[in-house]
Image (spheres, helix red, strand yellow):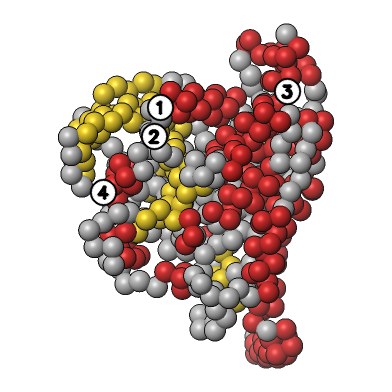
């Protein structure tokens, strides 16, 4: 036993010497990376080799599946090491620049300056060369795909993963929002709205930052349409009033909710009433509730200051926690339903609000799919990379994981085949 203890002491001393030498040579980042290498590689190997299943279409579309025998919509089995989207326990801060790493396929990795970093990264501050390069990539990134290229690309896992990792996330440095009390306004303290496109709530005291703040961003739509969407976090108990203020202020006709209220932990507060309620002077009353196979539809009337408006909430519940949906058609049907409802809304209506829990993953997939379906119908091609870059310019981290990026490609591939099938008929 004494000999064994002695040998262990020598071994520990050797490890400490190696660690010290490597830290001096390569910095602290080397040690944390080395400690996480095996665990990280295992996570990424799981995400890069997903299992697939054929997407299930309705009976009327069964003959469409004969068009191609290749697997269609991915089902990603992340059972080895998966974490909930945006879960605060998955967030890790590494001592590298904001855009040094591109993100993780499974867990959300936010890369920011280490505490005490003196590199400026605030609103109006000069960007570092690395951050400037990331912004340029997001402004210029493009990869237009014809239908045949889209179908080939959708099953090229390696190419999609490489493209996903090369695309900067564009997360916000928390130092940019150094305001006392702001933590109460954010569901996740490291997922913050990009300053240039954030929604600013109108208030009598505009100098009071907290009263103007909500974790939400305006997003461009198809063809550069300004403020076509608002992407936001799932409201918390502390921000339900702010959420309804935003709905009224922006004249939003539609809310798309893509999360359950709880998925192992709370993902979103139940911000709507069973019958009626008043928030911030806005009277919210439920008119009808319709339950469909994959989502529920609530129609509200909102009253404030003698004015009355109608609002529709689509609550999509068929997106499983920690995975991508195993069926594309329900998502495509919801996209078309929301698009039709928006076309029927009053001309003075504002953006469509889309939220999940953090407001970047599932939210990003839905908005990207909506934009790209329009592009495919109008132009006959899609540019998923360009759309992703534009979304991330407006709100960092949109389309959060590599699996979600693959899923968007599969959905668009299926949608193109659906369009082609209709044309042939």
Identify the secondary structure beneath mark 4: helix
Residue assigned mark 4: 241
Q: Name the residue nearer the viewer: 107 or 291.
A: 291
Mark 4 and mark 1 lie on one chain; the one further toward the N terminus is: 4
Residue assigned mark 1: 345
Foreground disc of the pair 3, 1: 1
Q: Residues within 10 Å of mark 4 (few under 14, many from 20)?
A: some
Q: Is residue 3 visible?
A: no
Measured in 3D between alpha carbons, the distance from the residue under mark 4 to the one under mark 1, in whole angstroms, is 24 Å
Identify the secondary structure beneath mark 2: loop
- Give the image location of residue 47, x and y in percent: 68, 49
Above or below — where is 170 with respect to 235? below
Give residue 349's mark.
Answer: 2
Q: Are marks 2 and 1 in contact (CB under 8 Å)?
A: yes
Q: Are marks 2 and 3 in contact (CB under 8 Å)?
A: no
Residue assigned mark 3: 417
Measured in 3D between alpha carbons, the distance from the residue under mark 3 to the one under mark 1, in whole angstroms, is 29 Å
- Give the image location of residue 144, x and y in percent: 76, 41
- Give the image location of residue 400, x and y in percent: 58, 51
Say which residue appears at 48% left-offset and 45% top-offset.
Answer: 227
Foreground disc of the pair 4, 1: 1
Q: Residues within 10 Å of mark 1 (few under 14, many from 20)?
A: some
């Amino acid at each position: 036993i004494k000999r064994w203890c002695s040998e262990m002491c020598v071994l520990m001393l050797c490890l400490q010497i190696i660690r010290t030498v490597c830290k001096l040579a390569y910095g602290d980042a080397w040690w944390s990376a080395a400690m996480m290498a095996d665990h990280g590689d295992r996570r990424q190997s799981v995400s890069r080799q997903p299992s697939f299943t054929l997407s299930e279409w309705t009976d009327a579309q069964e003959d469409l599946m004969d068009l191609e025998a290749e697997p269609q919509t991915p089902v990603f089995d992340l059972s080895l090491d998966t974490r909930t989207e945006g879960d605060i326990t998955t967030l890790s801060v590494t001592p590298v620049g904001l855009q040094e790493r591109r993100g993780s396929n499974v867990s959300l990795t936010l890369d920011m300056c280490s505490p005490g970093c003196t590199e400026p990264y605030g609103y109006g501050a000069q960007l570092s060369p690395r951050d400037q390069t990331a912004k340029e990539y997001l402004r210029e990134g493009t990869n237009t795909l014809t239908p045949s290229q889209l179908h080939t690309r959708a099953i090229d896992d390696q190419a999609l993963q490489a493209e996903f990792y090369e695309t900067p996330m564009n997360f916000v440095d928390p130092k940019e929002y150094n305001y006392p009390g702001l933590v109460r306004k954010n569901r996740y303290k490291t997922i913050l709205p990009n300053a240039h496109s954030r929604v600013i709530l109108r208030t009598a005291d505009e100098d009071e930052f907290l009263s103007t703040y909500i974790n939400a961003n305006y997003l461009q739509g198809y063809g550069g349409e300004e403020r076509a969407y608002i992407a936001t976090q799932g409201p918390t108990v502390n921000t339900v009033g702010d959420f309804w203020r935003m709905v009224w202020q922006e004249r939003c006709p539609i809310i798309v909710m893509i999360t359950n209220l709880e998925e192992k932990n709370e993902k979103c507060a139940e911000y709507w009433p069973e019958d009626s309620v008043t928030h911030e002077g806005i009277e919210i009353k439920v008119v009808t509730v319709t339950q469909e196979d994959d989502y529920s539809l609530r129609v509200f009337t909102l009253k404030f200051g003698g004015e009355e408006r109608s609002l529709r909430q689509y609550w999509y519940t068929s997106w499983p926690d920690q995975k991508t949906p195993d069926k594309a058609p329900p998502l495509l049907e919801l996209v078309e339903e929301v698009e039709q409802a928006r076309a029927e809304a009053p001309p003075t209506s504002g953006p469509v609000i889309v939220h999940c829990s953090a407001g970047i993953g599932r939210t990003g997939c839905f908005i990207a799919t909506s934009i790209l379906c329009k592009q495919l119908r109008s132009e006959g091609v899609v540019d998923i990379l360009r759309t992703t870059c534009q979304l991330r310019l407006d709100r960092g981290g949109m389309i959060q994981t590599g699996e979600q990026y693959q899923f968007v490609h599969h959905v668009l591939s299926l949608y193109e085949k659906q369009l082609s099938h209709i044309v042939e008929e």
